[in-house]
Image (cartoon, grey):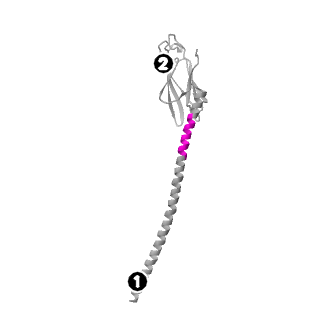
């Protein structure tokens, strides 16, 4: 009988200690969860603030790009925006249209273009033109000639009613990317 009383006391004391330890652990975990929840709420608020800042910056950057494009167009009104793999109508005397294509390998970009020349006049003409390239700020970064010695014709003359394509390519420094272009006739009257 004495053994049972002692064993019951040990069991009651053991359960009480286990219950107290469990309550301490639960209290500690509740405090930790509360701290982590507060930190998580702070992180979510900071992330929301950063996301809002990023969206505002994107909007502002878009506005600035539009402003820059407007300033470039006001300073150089005859520029056309360069687009790849799209026929861009020129209709500037005998230069009908132009198509740009981006080619290259391992970071070495080359810009190819195909120009369509058309003589809708009554006399043969000697085509001589150049394509001038500009960056997004309107600064000239290169040019390529549309030569007058196009193969397949007598001395490069473009006969009345003749339509001919001219292919060429130009390479820019890696840091320079063309955004606009202009076709200039060298023998414009």
Mark sitting earlier along the chain (1/2):
1
Q: How far apart are marks 1 and 2 (CA)?
A: 108 Å
Name the residue at the bottom extreme. 1
Q: Which residue is drawn at 47% across and 74% down?
A: 21
Image coords of residue 33 (percent x, y): 49, 63
Q: Which residue is drawn at 52% across and 50% down?
A: 48
Q: Which secondary structure type mostly characterizes the magenta part of the structure?
A: helix
Q: Does the magenta stretch include residue 64?
A: yes
Q: Nearer the viewer, residue 75 or 157?
A: 75
Q: What stretch is highlighted in magenta?
A: 53-66
Would you say residue 70 is visible in this rendering? yes
Image coords of residue 180 (percent x, y): 55, 29
Q: Quadrant of residue 133?
A: top right
Secondary structure state at the residue bearing disc 1: helix
Q: Nearer the viewer, residue 97 or 137?
A: 137
Residue 182, compared with residue 9, is above or below; it is above
Q: Does the magenta stretch include residue 86?
A: no
Q: Residue at x 54, y 45 (%)?
A: 54
Image coords of residue 118 (percent x, y): 49, 17
Identify the mark at residue 155; answer none if there is no mark. Answer: none
Locate the N terminus and report the quarter of the image it occupies: bottom left
Name the residue at the top extreme. 122
Residue to which mark 1 is pinned: 8
Residue to which mark 2 is pinned: 164
């Amino acid at each position: 009988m004495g053994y049972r009383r002692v064993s019951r006391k040990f069991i009651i004391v053991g359960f009480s200690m286990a219950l107290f330890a469990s309550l301490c652990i639960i209290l500690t975990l509740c405090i930790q969860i509360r701290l982590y929840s507060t930190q998580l709420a702070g992180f979510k608020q900071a992330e929301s603030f950063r996301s809002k800042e990023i969206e505002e910056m994107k909007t502002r950057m878009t506005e600035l790009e539009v402003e820059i494009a407007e300033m470039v167009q006001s300073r150089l009104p005859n520029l056309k925006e360069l687009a790849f793999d799209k026929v861009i109508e020129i209709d500037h005397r005998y230069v009908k249209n132009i198509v740009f294509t981006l080619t290259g390998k391992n970071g070495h970009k080359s810009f190819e273009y195909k120009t369509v020349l058309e003589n809708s006049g009554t006399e043969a003409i000697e085509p001589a033109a150049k394509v001038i390239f500009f960056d997004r700020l309107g600064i000239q970064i290169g040019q390529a000639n549309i030569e007058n010695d196009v193969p397949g014709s007598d001395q490069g003359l473009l006969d009345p009613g003749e339509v001919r394509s001219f292919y060429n390519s130009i390479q820019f420094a890696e840091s320079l990317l063309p955004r606009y272009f202009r076709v200039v006739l060298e023998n414009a009257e």
